[in-house]
Amino acid sequence: MSVLDWVYYGNTVKTWIIALAAAALVLVFLEVSKTIISRRLAAFAQRTETEIGDIAADLVGKTRFFFLLALSAYTGTQVLTLPEVAARAVSKFAVLAGLAQTALWGNGLFTHYLARYAKQRMVEDNATATTMAALGFIGRIVLWTVIVLVALDNLGVEINSLIAGLGIGGIAVALAVQNVLGDLLASLSIILDKPFVVGDFIVVDSFRGTVEHVGLKTTRVRSIEGEQIIFSNADLLNSRIRNYKRMTERRVVFTLGVTYQTPYERLAAIPSLLQEIIESHQGVRFDRAHFSAYGPYALNFEVVYFVTDPDFKIHMDLHQSINLAVFQRFEREGIQFAYPTQMVFIHKP
């Protein structure tokens, strides 16, 4: 009897050699095919503007050696006559490798599409990076959870009872970390609803500043004074938020008072003078000017106008210019501003 005819584990040496040769040939073929396809897809992606080539090249590049090895081993075992237990083990190994590779491909698709969306939206929305990070994190958790459950089911684990146990455990964990979950859900609300984004100037209660970062648990704001203010996302959404970055114009209201000795003709002309002064400035929309009240020592006028540019510095520059113009015009017209005065009457018996 030839050595090739010796039998080991139900198969001759010749059969084992054929099986190993088949597995090796398949492994080499798959590796060479992966390299060639990857290069051609990369060249195709450079020649075209579509993303199909980029996606395909990325997925081929994420194909791992263990997956190719599992396919090669499974192919080689088809030549052999194996016991049922061994055949089942090889089959499960191939399935598990396929599930792991599927998870890697899915993760690659998540990364590609989220990066593409973030790149498109980054110019108009600085919070897109946080949005994509949160959505990618959730998507990957769901993907790997499904893969693990399918793998356990393939290994013979009763996943129905496992899912029920995870549900009960999840409730207990949720109760223990409800504050963290509340902040996480609040962050998703901020990300999806976008009451503000990175770069917006907001006011929350007595705090004001520019949004620097929107995280999964906290939001960081740089105050006018320079320090960083950190808000819990849940507390932030429960507060009244004023977003000054989304202003289209600024409303300005100011009051000035003139003396009681002002003649009636000049007093009646003051609203028209104020309107003329305000309308002479570019970027300002006049609303109204009225003799509003008799004060303790002054006749008060209320003036309202709008600055059509929401920038605070522009608003203050225009307000200063209008104040100087009012002072100059009143000085020329002989209208005196009032200041706190008191008259004392002395009665001599």
Image (spheres, rainbow, N blue to C red):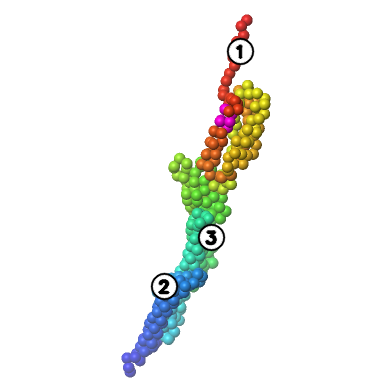
Q: Read off the magenta span.
A: 326-331
On residue 59, which mark appears?
none
The mark closer to the camera, 1 or 3, is 1
The first of marks 1 and 3 along the sequence is: 3
Q: Tag 2: residue type?
A: Arg
Q: Tag 3: residue type?
A: Gly
Q: Tag 1: residue type?
A: Phe
Instruction: Give the side of residue 133 with respect to residue 252, left or right.
Output: left
User: Dot 2: what SS?
Assistant: loop
Judging by the rendered image, the residue that carries numbered circle 2 is: 64
Within 10 Å of disc 1 (Cα), the crowding (few <14, some 14-19, many 20+) is: few
- Compare residues 271 and 133 and report the one nearer the observer: 271
The mark closer to the camera, 1 or 2, is 1
Within 10 Å of disc 3 (Cα), the crowding (few <14, some 14-19, many 20+) is: few
Q: Is residue 30 above or below residue 301?
A: below
Residue in view at x 57 percent, y 24 percent = 339
Judging by the rendered image, the residue that carries numbered circle 3 is: 167
Position of the N terminus, as image quadrant, is bottom left
Dominant secondary structure of the residues highlighted in magenta in the image: helix
User: Dot 1: what SS?
Assistant: loop
Image quadrant in which you'd find residue 267? top right
Within 10 Å of disc 2 (Cα), the crowding (few <14, some 14-19, many 20+) is: some
On residue 345, which mark appears?
1
- Where is residue 144 drawn, in percent x and y? 48, 65
Q: CA distance from mark 2 to mark 3?
A: 33 Å
- Where is residue 227 drawn, in percent x and y? 44, 42
Q: CA distance from mark 1 to mark 2?
A: 101 Å
- Where is residue 176 drawn, in percent x and y? 50, 52
Residue 297 appears in the figure: yes
